[in-house]
Image (cartoon, grey):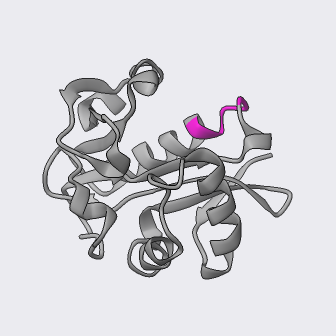
């Protein structure tokens, strides 16, 4: 059974392993970025665990606009209690735990948090090959992102709160 919980500092090594399995070095979050996210946004940094081992995670700060900007990968702030958009800077599942619906479970948990905290919706950027996957989860493609993160082309994907009910 999958157990969801908020991130803890002791998770860092497992998180980095999963992040580096899921993203090339130019795109992967650094240890420093994870430490900052664990300290500042543990309320929106969720890990999926099974048998005491982390299977995957999702994280991102609350932002005021519907699209992610590259500065978020460098510097974030603590989340406001209400409002804003839930951004997703990272969603990764361990190689050995893929195709078991863990990403879906993590996205659903973020949706619960959006509704609970009266946010506008969820925003993320993804590469072309993942656009159709996020569309299946109810996200709308708003076209090419201005993000240059990792030197890759990203697409703005947003799911508004009304689409979550």
At 66% from the left and 32% from the top, the residue drawn is 101
**Along the line of sight, the residue nearer the viewer: 56 or 17:** 17
Of helix, strand and loop, which mostly describes the magenta segment?
Answer: loop
At 45% from the left and 26% from the top, the residue drawn is 130
Q: What stretch is highlighted in magenta?
A: 99-103
**Quarter of the figure with residue 121:** top left
**Along the line of sight, the residue nearer the viewer: 30 or 109:** 30
Report if residue 89 lies within the magenta region.
Answer: no
**Along the line of sight, the residue nearer the viewer: 152 or 53:** 152
Report if residue 102 lies within the magenta region.
Answer: yes
Left or right, 92 with reference to 40: right
Left or right, 129 with reference to 99: left
At 28% from the left and 72% from the top, the residue drawn is 75
Residue 117, horizontal then vertical, whole percent? 30, 57
Left or right, 48 with reference to 65: right
Judge whether 43 appears above or below 116 on screen: below
């Amino acid at each position: 059974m999958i157990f969801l919980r908020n991130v803890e500092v002791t998770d860092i090594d497992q998180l980095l392993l999963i992040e580096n399995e899921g993203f090339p070095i130019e795109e992967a979050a650094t240890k420093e970025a994870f430490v900052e996210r664990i300290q500042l946004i543990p309320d929106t940094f969720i890990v999926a665990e099974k048998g005491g081992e982390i299977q995957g995670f999702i994280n991102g700060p609350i932002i005021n606009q519907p699209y992610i900007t590259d500065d978020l990968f460098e510097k974030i702030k603590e989340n406001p209690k209400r409002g804003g958009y839930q951004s997703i800077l990272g969603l990764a599942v361990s190689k050995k735990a893929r195709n078991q619906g863990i990403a879906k479970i993590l996205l659903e948990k973020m949706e619960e948090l959006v509704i609970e905290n009266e946010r506008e919706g969820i925003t993320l950027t993804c590469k072309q090959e993942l656009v159709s996957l996020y569309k299946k989860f109810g996200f709308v493609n708003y076209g090419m992102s201005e993000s240059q993160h990792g030197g890759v082309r990203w697409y703005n994907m947003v799911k508004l709160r009304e689409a979550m009910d």
